[in-house]
């Protein structure tokens, strides 16, 4: 699914109006029907609704929703913020329609007009949509704070009022609606995917409103939401007479004394994701742990008893993964530098491999093009620079991927995958139960397996991230977020692959 900028969304509206064709006010009617249908299907009939509407088209959406709720017999009170320069055309049409029903909205001209809000009411926020160009101030800001200070649920139409759809780095935190839910039209907005905006968007739902398919197909955007429809075609089918040699021989360099669990988790996930053969390079004291815990894997022993210090012969491997729990000793750093210097094979680097590079930033230039890095935000900041917010970090992620021709997987609630062509894919699977030690090791194993099977690095990253989250979603069906551990994700990889293919 494409993620469009706010200006592109306006273009999509205009294209639909011109080429469907459909009038602007009837497209608004379509959006209001989608909002109304969702509310009717998700709230009891005796719900009391209070709508706060602005003078622009988002307010027009709110007025149309109010009319439709009234027609369905739902108790609805509508309040309209007095405009400084008149109502938009479509808002004016919907205002007249309410007057014709003998239900004109109350006009708010000052703070004294703000009503008391009962905790049992549901507020619909229709003050400002994606057309907002500056932080909210004055009377509208006072109204936003009044809504936020209530204990009522808030449903924002399209965008929480005061939040910009793309870049909020210069925004005013105190003048943004804190929605319980955001019902957004056709596309997710970039702002929904950043951690610091969660308190404003709440749970967000995308409602299709029939924007023109031709425009959606042709419009160019670097941002995408990787969902089932996108990922399913990326999966490779297995031929009837295939054998293990057809699915790659992977090398996993992982583990150090006291931290061999990371190697076992990554290796298990690599095997569970379809690799034909797997060799795990471990320190001598890790041999029995991996052999006893995972008899399907082969072992390559390091010269050191306790940490990674030398490379094995790399010629026979189709893909290499390095990093989980390696430690950052000088010898490990030298061995990793050798890996980067001589390797021309698909590779994924995680955890301590990234930390070693962060300590020796000259190594960034040595990383082979197409290599996948999988940092969490702290590791990414150590690798690049400190970032004030998620939007800044996203820009750096995309720049690093383009300039160094790497695939950067930035882990989080909506893990993003930046590719060398400047594209960025946000992941749609996963849940908070995955916020536990070892889940990154599981992801490394999955991506390594896909690389070994011949997946393009960008496809391996996007597919691996989605399957990782999908396995977590299968695990959460039988567990609670508190009880999930990384091994539960590995255990559910088979269910994830099966459900994605079905």
Image (tube, helix red, strand yellow):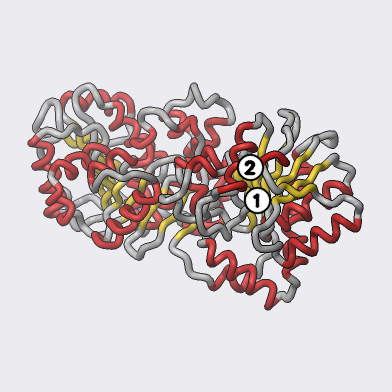
Q: CA distance from mark 2 to mark 1?
A: 9 Å
Is 345 left or right of 219, judged from the image as shown? left
Count residues near mark 2 (Cα–Cα under 10 Å), then give few for <14, some for 14-19, many for 20+.
many
Q: Earlier in the sequence, mark 2 or mark 1?
A: 1
For mark 2, give the secondary structure.
Answer: helix
Residue where numbered disc 1 is placed: 127
Which residue is found at the position 67% from the left and 72% from the top?
A: 16
Across and down, in percent, residue 92 comes to 77, 63
Which residue is found at the position 12% from the left and 47% from the top?
A: 337
The residue nearer to you, when weighing 277 against 413, is 413
Across and down, in percent, residue 308 comes to 15, 34
- Mark 2 in CB contact with mark 1 (< 8 angstroms): yes
Is 324 left or right of 184, judged from the image as shown? left
Residue where numbered disc 2 is placed: 143
Q: How many marks?
A: 2
Across and down, in percent, residue 459 comes to 40, 57
Across and down, in percent, residue 271 comes to 37, 40
Which residue is found at the position 70% from the left and 53% from the top?
A: 82
Count residues near mark 1 (Cα–Cα under 10 Å), then give few for <14, some for 14-19, many for 20+.
many
- Corner quadrant of residue 355: top left
Instruction: Please tell me whether residue 230 is drawn above or below residue 467 in the rendered image.
Output: below
For mark 1, give the secondary structure.
Answer: loop
Residue 490 makes an appearance in the image:
yes
Quadrant in the picture for the N terminus: bottom right
Residue 454 makes an appearance in the image:
no
């Amino acid at each position: 699914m494409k993620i469009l900028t706010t200006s592109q969304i306006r273009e999509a509206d205009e294209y639909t109006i011109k080429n469907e064709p459909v009038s602007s006010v009837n497209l608004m009617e379509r959006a209001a029907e989608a909002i109304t249908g969702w509310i009717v299907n998700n709230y009891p009939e005796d719900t009391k609704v209070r709508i706060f509407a602005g003078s622009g088209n988002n307010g027009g959406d709110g007025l149309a929703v109010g009319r439709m709720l009234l027609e369905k017999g739902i108790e609805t009170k509508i309040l309209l913020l007095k405009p400084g320069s008149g109502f938009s055309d479509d808002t004016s049409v919907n205002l007249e329609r309410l007057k014709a029903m003998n239900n004109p909205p109350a006009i708010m001209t000052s703070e004294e007009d703000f009503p008391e809000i009962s905790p049992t009411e549901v507020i619909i926020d229709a003050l400002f949509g994606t057309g907002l160009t500056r932080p909210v101030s004055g009377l509208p800001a006072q109204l936003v704070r009044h809504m936020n200070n209530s204990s009522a649920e808030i449903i924002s139409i399209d965008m929480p009022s005061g939040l910009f759809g793309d870049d909020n780095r210069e925004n005013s935190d105190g003048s943004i609606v804190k929605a319980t839910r955001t019902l957004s039209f056709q596309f997710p907005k970039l702002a929904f995917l950043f951690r610091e905006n969660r308190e404003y968007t709440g749970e967000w739902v995308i409602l299709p409103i029939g924007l023109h398919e031709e425009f959606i197909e042709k419009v160019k955007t670097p941002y995408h939401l990787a969902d089932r429809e996108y990922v399913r075609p990326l999966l490779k089918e297995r031929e009837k007479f295939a054998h293990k040699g057809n699915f790659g021989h992977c090398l996993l360099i992982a583990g150090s004394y006291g931290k061999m669990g990371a190697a076992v988790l990554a290796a298990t996930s690599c095997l569970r994701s379809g690799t034909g053969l797997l060799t795990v390079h471990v320190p001598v004291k890790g041999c029995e742990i991996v052999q006893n815990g995972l008899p399907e894997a082969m072992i390559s022993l390091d010269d050191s008893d306790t940490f990674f210090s030398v490379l094995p012969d790399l010629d026979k491997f189709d893909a290499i993964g390095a990093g989980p729990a390696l430690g950052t000793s000088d010898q490990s750093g030298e061995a990793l530098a050798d890996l980067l210097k001589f390797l021309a094979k698909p590779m994924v680097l995680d955890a301590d491999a990234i930390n070693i590079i962060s300590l020796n930033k000259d190594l960034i230039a040595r990383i082979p093009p197409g290599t996948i890095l999988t940092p969490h935000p702290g590791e990414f900041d150590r690798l690049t620079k400190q970032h004030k917010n998620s939007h800044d970090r996203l820009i750096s992620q995309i720049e690093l991927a383009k300039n160094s021709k790497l695939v950067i997987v930035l882990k989080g609630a909506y893990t993003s995958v930046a590719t060398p062509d400047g594209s960025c894919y946000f992941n749609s699977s996963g849940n908070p139960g995955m916020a536990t030690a070892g889940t990154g090791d599981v992801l490394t194993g999955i991506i390594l397996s896909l690389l070994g099977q011949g997946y393009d690095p960008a496809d391996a990253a996007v597919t691996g991230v989605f399957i990782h989250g999908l396995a977590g979603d299968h695990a959460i069906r039988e567990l609670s977020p508190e009880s999930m551990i990384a091994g539960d994700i590995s255990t559910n990889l088979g269910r994830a692959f099966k459900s994605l293919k079905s």
